[in-house]
Image (spheres, helix red, strand yellow):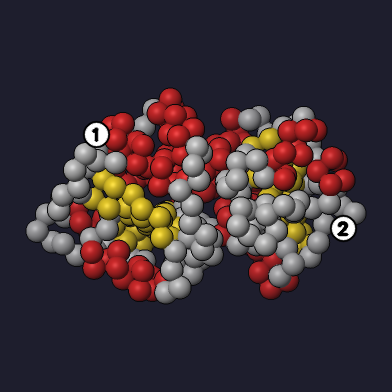
């Protein structure tokens, strides 16, 4: 946190259905580390249009956007940057209007750093179509599922599945990316499993559950978890127990948050700073 908050301190925030301290601690750690006059706070809301109006009216610099707001926020912003426009999903808003001296009019630009995080971590962990040649299944049909599916497609995975109970959103998402839709995994055993559902999330109704049958995890050649709280979801614990190549939700959260941080502040933290901020953020979520 800044030593002193003044009228010039810039505020960034997050909007989430289930806010945690993960992003708050990550961003505030780096503000202090880099001596930046910013502060970050997490919020939830039952009135998304009013919350975005508040970003405009109060000159708030930026906002992280989490489930379930990633698509609902699109009509409320002024501009979709290419990363968000390509997949019609938003996880970051930057108020560029407050950078214009003497103007003061808000201009909200939306980005998607989830896509960048998943794509970057697949490459970093060596999870490729050559290493996992079977089907790649994305569990879920929301904004994070969409970002993840786009990252898998662009990485060259040829056989994509969308596993989602909601036929309307699941089938539509699958058709958009040339994937197959399944209402449930059943006896299918994909080589890559990517969980983009809330199953396993702390505080949710399925916090202690796996998103797929255990046998599907046992058969998988790689697992990607995007749930970040807790760090060790049931899926992460099982993948580690099996020795399966794994990308964790905390890695996804840290990568996308570092991209957000650079968009908000114009400063790109080093890899070591991102690592230490991630460790600090996970001590009390």
Q: Residue at x 56, y 40 (%)?
A: 250
Farthest residue to the left: give it: 102
- Depth check, mark 2 against mark 1: the one in front is 1
Could you tell me which quadrant the N terminus lies in?
top left
SS at mark 1 in the image: loop
For residue 263, what is the image quadrant? top left
Q: Residues within 10 Å of mark 1 (few under 14, many from 20)?
A: few
Q: Which mark is residue 208?
A: none
- Residue 142: give x, y in percent of width and height: 60, 62
Q: Which mark is residue 35?
A: 1
> 63 or 46: nearer the eye?
46
Q: Is residue 247 left or right of residue 85?
A: right
> 103 or 157: nearer the eye?
103
- Residue 211: give x, y in percent of width and height: 74, 54
Between the C-alphas of marks 2 and 1, the distance is 52 Å
Judging by the rendered image, the residue that carries numbered circle 2 is 186
Is any atom of residue 89 visible in this view? no
SS at mark 2 in the image: loop
- Residue 282: give x, y in percent of width and height: 51, 39
> 50 or 191: nearer the eye?
50
Q: Residue at x 45, y 48 (%)?
A: 21
Q: Residue at x 23, y 60 (%)?
A: 59
Is any atom of residue 107 visible in this view? yes
**Residue 46 higher or lower than 283, as above or below:** below
For residue 259, what is the image quadrant? top left
Q: Residue at x 34, y 36 (%)?
A: 30
Q: Earlier in the sequence, mark 2 or mark 1?
A: 1
Farthest residue to the top: give it: 272
């Amino acid at each position: 946190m800044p030593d002193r908050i003044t009228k010039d301190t810039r505020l960034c925030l997050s909007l989430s259905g289930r806010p945690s301290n993960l992003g708050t601690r990550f961003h505030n750690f780096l503000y202090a580390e880099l001596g930046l006059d910013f502060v970050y706070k997490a919020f939830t809301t039952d009135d998304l249009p009013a919350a975005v109006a508040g970003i405009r009216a109060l000159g708030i610099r930026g906002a992280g956007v989490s489930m379930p707001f990633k698509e609902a926020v699109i009509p409320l912003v002024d501009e979709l940057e290419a990363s968000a426009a390509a997949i019609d999903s938003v996880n970051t808003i930057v108020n560029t209007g407050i950078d214009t001296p003497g103007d003061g009019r808000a201009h909200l630009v939306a980005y998607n750093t989830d896509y960048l995080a998943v794509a970057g971590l697949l490459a970093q962990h060596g999870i490729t179509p050559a290493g996992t040649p079977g089907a790649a299944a994305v569990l879920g049909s929301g904004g994070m599922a969409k970002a993840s599916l786009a990252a898998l497609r662009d990485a060259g995975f040829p056989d994509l599945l969308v596993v989602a109970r909601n036929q309307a959103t699941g089938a539509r998402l699958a058709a958009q990316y040339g994937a197959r839709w399944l209402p449930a995994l059943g006896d299918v055993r994909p080589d890559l499993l990517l969980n983009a559902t809330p199953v396993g999330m702390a505080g949710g109704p399925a916090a202690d559950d796996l998103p797929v049958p255990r046998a599907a995890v046992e058969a998988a050649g790689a697992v990607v978890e995007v749930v970040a709280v807790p760090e060790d979801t049931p899926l992460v614990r099982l993948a580690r127990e099996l020795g399966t190549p794994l990308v964790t939700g905390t890695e996804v959260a840290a990568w996308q948050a570092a991209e957000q941080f650079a968009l908000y502040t114009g400063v790109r933290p080093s890899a070591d700073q991102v690592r230490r901020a991630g460790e600090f953020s996970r001590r009390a979520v």
